Amino acid sequence: MNISQSQNNTSVLTFRTDFWWLAPLSSVLAIVAFVIYSTWAAFQGGHFEYQNYHSPFSWPIHPKWWPFSPAFLTIWAPLGFRATCYYVRRVYYRSFFRDPIACAVRESRKSYSGETDVPFIFQNLHRFFLYTTLIELAVLWLDAIHGFIFSGRFGFGIGSLVLLMNSTLLSLYTFSCHAFRHLVGGNLDCFSQCPKRSFLWKKISILNERHGLYMWISLGWVGFSDLYVRMLSMGIWKDIRFF
Ligand code: FES
């Protein structure tokens, strides 16, 4: 196609003939499904515990003075962490704002101001959400360990494995974070002067390559973990105890 033809076709969305719309569409469906479920669970405000299992959607300690759902004590940290995640930003800029929706597909916006407008300026808070998420991750690991203790004795059931998997996947997502990678290896002029940080940075860089994958799997699994504990608490599902 020559330049004059291309100028005549500025109203065409794209010349791509492959299934380029599949990725943004699936992202929209997955994110909307998670947001609907997690919002409903947070406002519903109950069924976050079953015996020694605790849902990742709520803080294990529920202060008496707190009048709202316990989920609101904790949900803001992972919500802020995910909403400002570099990978998730790419996903929702493409799939929700069509900015651009895919490579070689016409953009919907007329002007560009980057991330300098409200509310996008708050994307800079990502590293601070990382710090709060690290604290919550430690609590989730305590919950996962607690899931193996039945009446003071070690044991395990399906729920123990569900919570263990949840903490593992959330750890992979958190420790593969770009901001965490920078925290470990950033602001260094010379890696050879800091071999331990260099070593850690290289390991985190390997995790970082799969950051998007960990984001999606951990998102799905954290929702499933809450659903599992909720179904047990409501008496709809029965947990299988191995010993
Ligand atoms: Fe995705 Fe930090 S870049 S969690």
Image: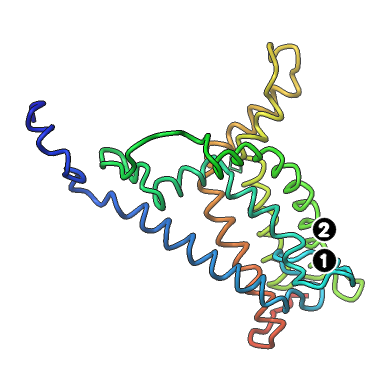
73 shown above or below 121: below
- Of badges 1 and 2, the one in the foreground is 1
Q: Is residue 226 left or right of residue 35?
A: right
Q: Quadrant of ligand 1?
A: top right
173 shown above or below 73: above
Query: Which residue appears at 7% of the width and 28% of the height?
Result: 4
The answer to which quarter of the image holds residue 196 is: top right
Residue that lies at the very extreme toward the right in this rendered image: 152
Q: Amino acid at mark 1?
A: Pro
Query: Which residue appears at 67% of the width and 23% of the height?
Result: 186
The spot of residue 149 in percent (x, y) is 85, 69
The dot on residue 142 is 2
Comes first in the chain, label 1 or label 2: 1
Q: Nearer the viewer, residue 186 or 192?
A: 186
Dot 1: what SS? loop
Asked whether the residues under the numbered discs 1 and 2 touch, taking CB atoms below 8 Å apart as contact, a structural biologist would say: yes
Q: Is residue 178 left or right of residue 154?
A: left
The answer to which quarter of the image holds residue 155 is: bottom right
The dot on residue 60 is 1
Q: Nearer the viewer, residue 210 or 139?
A: 139
Q: Amino acid at mark 2?
A: Leu
The spot of residue 130 in percent (x, y) is 70, 42
The dot on residue 186 is none
Circle 1 Cα neighbour tier, 10 Å, few/some/many (<14 / 14–19 / ≥20) = some
Q: Respond yes or no on whether mark 2 lies under 8 Å from ligand 1.
A: no
The answer to which quarter of the image holds residue 176 is: top right
The spot of residue 129 in percent (x, y) is 70, 44
Quadrant in the picture for the N terminus: top left
Give the alpha-carbon distance from disc 1 to disc 2, as whole Å. Answer: 10 Å
The spot of residue 82 in percent (x, y) is 60, 50
Query: Which residue appears at 69% of the width and 60% of the height?
Result: 75
